[in-house]
Amino acid sequence: MWRDALLVAGKDLRIEARSRVGLWQVVPFAVLVLILVAFAIGPDTASLRHAAPGIFWIAVLFSTVLTIQRSVAIESGEGTRDGLRLSGIDPAGIFLGKAAAVGLQLLVLQIVLWAGVTFLFNVRVHVVWLAAVTSLLATVGLACAGVLYGALSAGLRVRDTLLPILVLPVLAPVLLAGSKAWQAALEGNASSGAEWLRILIPFSVIYLVVGIVLYGPLQEAA
């Protein structure tokens, strides 16, 4: 399973590196979300600093949808999914590989976004470990949930419009917990921020386990 996961992750990442969709579309879109939401809040520096974690995670969630759509599109060609099913690759390995590829892209995106937030809103993280753990847990949950719902909508003609409707409400706990934990990391309140990890940990574990178990049947049904 792990070997298959590495093969699938490597395949997806090589395709993304060659197409540069993430570089020329997803990253500019995420930065544009930061700027537009900042304009909506207004020029008040204190308000922008207070809202920075929420703006950051809103941009991450919207960008996650684009990344998942791209991940699904890789297998949308004629006979591609059938080829995967007949290749003998463990479906759990496919799920883990695609989730790992999506997760790595999201981590890189978060680094770029936080650099943008730091530059635009002049904020600084005081509890680095809390922010890092929050990002890692949230990324696992976002990637696993996104790949799972991407598989659910993969065989439908309306998958591009259906996927955001399916995914965004499910990812609301990540938006809430991620924003609160990062706010605590900015304020230097580690104990308060750690409380929000209790939402992210089960969310990530549940979708990781459910994805490993159900990705195969979903792939057969697509």
Image (spheres, rainbow, N blue to C red):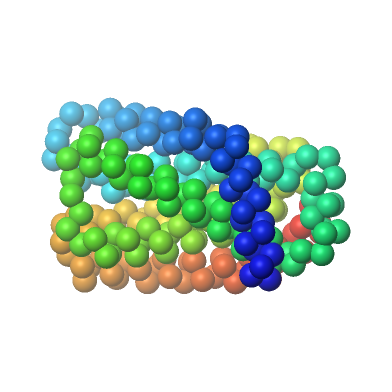
Q: Nearer the viewer, residue 175 or 79?
A: 79
Rendered location of residue 183, percent (x, y): 24, 55
Image-quadrant location for residue 59: top left
| Left or right: 75 in relation to 19 | right
| Quadrant of the image containing the N terminus | bottom right
Tell me the residue at 66%/56% (across/down): 8
Q: How many numbered circles are shown? A: 0
Rendered location of residue 220, percent (x, y): 81, 59
Tell me the residue at 32%/53% (across/down): 179
Tell me the residue at 75%/42% (across/down): 76
| Left or right: 196 in relation to 9 | left
Rendered location of residue 131, percent (x, y): 29, 59
- Rendered view: 89 above or below 80: below
Residue 210 seen in this snapshot: yes
Residue 184 seen in this snapshot: no
Rendered location of residue 51, percent (x, y): 25, 44
Tell me the residue at 56%/40% (across/down): 17
